[in-house]
Amino acid sequence: MSILVDGSTRVVVQGITGRAGSFHARACLDYGTRIVAGVTPGRGGQKLDDRVPIFDSVAEAKQLTGCNASLIFVPASGAVDAMLETAASGIELIVCITEGIPILDMVRARRSLEGTSTRLIGPNCPGVITPGQCKIGIMPGYIHKPGPVGIVSRSGTLTYEAVWQLSQTGIGQSSCVGIGGDPVHGLGLREVIEMFDRDPATEAILVIGEIGGCEEQEAAVFWETSSRKPTAVFLAGVTAPPGRRMGHAGAVITGTSGTVAAKIEAFQAVGIPIILSPADIGKGMAKALAAAVT
Amino acid sequence: MSILVDGSTRVVVQGITGRAGSFHARACLDYGTRIVAGVTPGRGGQKLDDRVPIFDSVAEAKQLTGCNASLIFVPASGAVDAMLETAASGIELIVCITEGIPILDMVRARRSLEGTSTRLIGPNCPGVITPGQCKIGIMPGYIHKPGPVGIVSRSGTLTYEAVWQLSQTGIGQSSCVGIGGDPVHGLGLREVIEMFDRDPATEAILVIGEIGGCEEQEAAVFWETSSRKPTAVFLAGVTAPPGRRMGHAGAVITGTSGTVAAKIEAFQAVGIPIILSPADIGKGMAKALAAAVT
Amino acid sequence: MNVFEYQARDLLGQYGLPIPVGGVATSPEEARHIAERLAKGPFVVKAQILAGGRGKGRFLSGFSGGVRLCSHPAEVEEIARVMLGGVLVTMQTGPEGRSVNKVLVAEAPQISRELYLAILIDRGRRCPVVIGSAQGGVDIEEVARKDPEAIHRIWVDPQVGFWPYQARELAMRMGLHGPLLNPAADVIVRLYRFFCECDASLSEVNPLAVIENEKFAVIDAKIGFDENALFRHPEIAACRNEVVEDAREAEALKAGLNYVGLSGEIGCMVNGAGLAMATMDILHRYGGEPANFLDVGGGADQNQVTKAFAILMADPKVRAIFVHIFGGIMQCDVIARGIVEAVSHTKPKVPVVVRLQGTNFEEGKAILHQSDLLIRTADDLAEAAQKAVAAARET
Amino acid sequence: MNVFEYQARDLLGQYGLPIPVGGVATSPEEARHIAERLAKGPFVVKAQILAGGRGKGRFLSGFSGGVRLCSHPAEVEEIARVMLGGVLVTMQTGPEGRSVNKVLVAEAPQISRELYLAILIDRGRRCPVVIGSAQGGVDIEEVARKDPEAIHRIWVDPQVGFWPYQARELAMRMGLHGPLLNPAADVIVRLYRFFCECDASLSEVNPLAVIENEKFAVIDAKIGFDENALFRHPEIAACRNEVVEDAREAEALKAGLNYVGLSGEIGCMVNGAGLAMATMDILHRYGGEPANFLDVGGGADQNQVTKAFAILMADPKVRAIFVHIFGGIMQCDVIARGIVEAVSHTKPKVPVVVRLQGTNFEEGKAILHQSDLLIRTADDLAEAAQKAVAAARET
């Protein structure tokens, strides 16, 4: 078991003929992901590496291959169009890697997805992986290892570091979800945490947050009433100055709720342990797991 | 009984301090309509003729007077804003007299009203009247007379002519609804016909249509299965040339469905008698009523 | 408000639609100069009138075709000389035809396919609809009758907007694939932007041509604008002076009257559009024909009544004037005084028949009778119409 | 991207927002000329820096106030002379302050009320929010703390848009009635149009002043733009060259690197924004302070690594360089070769500590060790950070 994706997920890659699209489609195929179709308008009828058929539209791809998840590498100016196309075709999961989408475009995109059955991960995210079964994204597959910890993160390479530390410590992962670094995006920390809470294969949860917004605070509220799965949290940006965008469009402290201090407070209020050093993520998670056993 | 409005309807007039707004608010009051409030932003706190309190917003008016219908005289550039304000306040009936609203604005307005409980009559219409009880519009009240015939019309003065002929012939009206002459508007012919069909006070229906669009055809379909109340129809514009806008923005023949001939055919197909001369509307209606009795 | 093809081209060009290069000429010499400036032939010379069917039209002079291909600038000049000042009759103009005052001269690209593309408002669904067909260059109503499946439609939710993927879907249904798919979607998206941003009521490109198997060209375009929205597009409203072909309509426009010129002999003046149409209809029933549609509106003042009279009387076809007013908010006695004033002032040479009904109609009638003017009246609509038809036959 | 007040004024003025007349000056004489051209005093002279709290700020020279009222053009010149070239320290600048290269000179209207108005994106609700308060001219965060009821919000459904009635509702809640209501709504609607059409991330007018009890004036405005949307606003993107106050950031911008200057002594080069922040955090844990945030991105090539080195080394505060790469898609051996190349080429005068982890990290380490360069390495993140902090203390 896992969340969002597993060995049966059938993936279409939008923008498959681009540099990043073809590179990562191949990497996902190598990992064992069932990439069943690609879409690049105007390139319908071609194939990627003689194995993945390319279509002009997602609707065509869905009709002919039964794909049920989409991985988007379309450039920022066309990414929202690609999302809406996917949603209109009835595909239920979108993972959008694209970086640099204007926030007002994302505001419109999210509003248009409301009321549809389509869930969005990203944009500006590494994607989602269920180790050993399905990788839909750009994360290095080999660092992952199947196991009991569900990871949800606003970051990319910091998540890889966390996964690496976990795997080195012998702790595998049920699924890892990078929700993306943009201020307006798809699934939020809390929604993914709720999924992990319901997922029988997930025994513990690792949350990787950062400065900006108040998703961490919204997520923390969850533990007031619900989850009893062991959880640990790391938050990046304790030294970040206010008002400056730290790489991610969403990583900027505006007002007090965006600071790491405010987020730490929210988690501590519900008794969730905070991992203070990024060097201690593996150890911290092990400790949280051990505490739960006793 | 009646449809849409009756003696208990409490009306707010939007744009009450304008020339047309104040003139017709007074005429409605004289007819006995319960005009309980006016709205003109910036004029809140004043009164019309020392009797109708004026507010800055519809929400205020609703809160303080309990109005449940709105009559709009706001100029075309602000009329859609006035409609949306009314809908947002939860008022359930809007009668919009305003002429000259751009069609794309009306497209947006109608889309925004979807899913709300607010019904729109008009714009570019004479309004609605339940004779002897409530007049919300610009029609001359005195020509009407309470009685059994429900009138629905796309026209203004032509409806007055029809009402006049009916009243002269001794046939009163349950309610008269002018749905307006714009291509995109609120309640349609068919919706009003269905209301008349359900209204116990309405024994017969008079439909006044004209060239343009295909509302008449959509309405005609209703009789295939439903209404058995005696009905007569007059259609204006048999001599109108194609492609020219005959005054009303909606009265233009584009394609074949917009012609009077196509509309006549649709009503004849379901056995509804057509009144061929505008001079015979009173007689024609009397005949339809008589035929039903026998 | 429809605009001429040359105006439509300019407006569409501003939205990046692919328009073959060319220009508009009012003299044969100018037409030749335009052709000389263009890269190479063949050229097309197109009579500018506000009606379709030009290609199969015929000039009153006997010259055939309002759209002609030419190989050389000299030939362009020759053709323009024949067209300019001529009267072109097409299936849509009626037998009187339309005067040609301008011709469009443009490059005539080598066309490999002709498609159809249009955007308009679907009144029933209350939203814009984008229509495409692989069968372009022909009458789309004809296609719709013979082969309805060949016409493809995308309805647009005004809250969500029109997205490129929808344009691609339409293009695919129009049979466009491979290297033509994205350029086609680009054309459709641009036309939609034009439609919305300019408050068009119709944006029809027919044919939209594929040229050299790789790009598109707008070969002919029919564009109409929502009159109610012209207030926010002063540059488009400025086209108006150019596009009123009928002198009577130009006058009415200035006076703020709702006027449509027709070919009958009874000048009509009515308050209300529906009543005005019904008035035309009843004249027709009694064997008369209206010279016009004229709605003076619900709040016409004496000044407008006077102007309306002047316009009706300036029409040489008019043999009788029929004034038909239902006094609702307007009071018939006030109207009657206006009519008396206007008739005294303008001294019509044709009979005037008046029907006043509604508020204060008896006072109104009395005023008309008390005047010394030759104004015929009637209470009943049928009687009034019959009197008007009879009056027109007298003269 | 935030812009200077004088730039914000120009942009808002294009949307019809009421901006007191004035201009920007780079010399005292120019400031005087601007004042002379204005109708009458009093005038205001405002130091142009990208930080708030100017009014209560103090120049390093001891001169007090980055916003000063003047009665005469001569006084304007005098004040501008003191401000221009000076360094202004405010609560938001940090102790090092900001250089003042331009001053704004404008009419200072008689203010009867000060209001607050702002539009930004509510991340939680994923939509724009329009915020207003009757308490303007003060720190809004302070108002929010002390009197949260005094702050009014209207959330906007992006599919429906923002309508004038909503603007009036906000204006009424801000205490604006009578003849001020419609003008206030007009200001709010225009600011919203600006916000959406220009892809602003923040549009704050504080104070929005009522002047002469009948009209409004934008006394100060803070405008930020969505960097991701600058591609569709070339004219706004052009402001960028003016607004980068930090020379290191200007360099990084040119090289396409994500760089934020800080005040510590350890230059950081990291791949990924989250990892870069975490790296800064761990240095801080061990008693060091980062000189910068620098994300070289997921696909940095050798050229970018070289440029990043150059920027770090050009910073006189930097006493050690810490390179921290997690090889995911990037392979550590490739990165290691890039570092070796860059270090050989740029010959840093400060110690370089490298932590490589992830794909091919052992090959990467071997490459670093085999080079003759003084590159210190560590496997563990804690160890690496400690080495970097220690290295910075050596020099």
Image (cartoon, coloured by chain):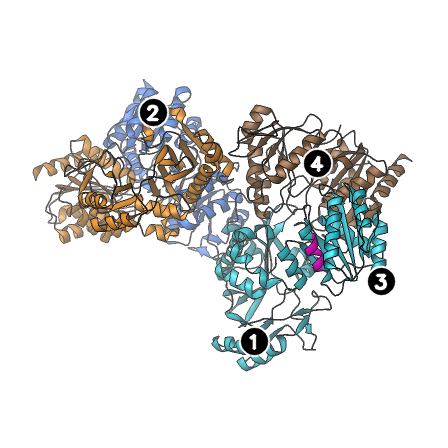
Chain colours: A blue, B brown, C cyan, D orange
Rendering coords of residue B55 (x, y %): 55, 30
Image mark for residue C27: 1
Which residue in the structure is indicated by mark 2? D145
**Circles 1 and 2 on the same chain:** no
Q: Quadrant of the C terminus of chain B?
A: top right
Query: Camera-side residue: B92 or D80?
Result: D80
Nearest to viewer (mark 1 / mark 2): 1
Nearest to viewer (mark 3 / mark 2): 3
The region drawn magenta spans: C305-311
Between the residue at mark 3 and the residue at mark 2, the CA separation in whole angstroms equals 86 Å
Which residue in the structure is indicated by mark 3? C393
Residue C13 in view, yes or no: yes
Nearest to viewer (mark 3 / mark 1): 3
Residue A284 lies in the magenta-colored region: no
Which residue in the structure is indicated by mark 4? B128
**Residue that extends furthest to the bottom in the rendered view of this protein:** C74
Between the residue at mark 4 and the residue at mark 3, the CA separation in whole angstroms equals 41 Å
Image mark for residue D14: none
- Which comes before the other along the chain, label 3 or label 1? 1
Three-letter residue code for mark 2: Arg
Between the residue at mark 4 and the residue at mark 2, the CA separation in whole angstroms equals 51 Å
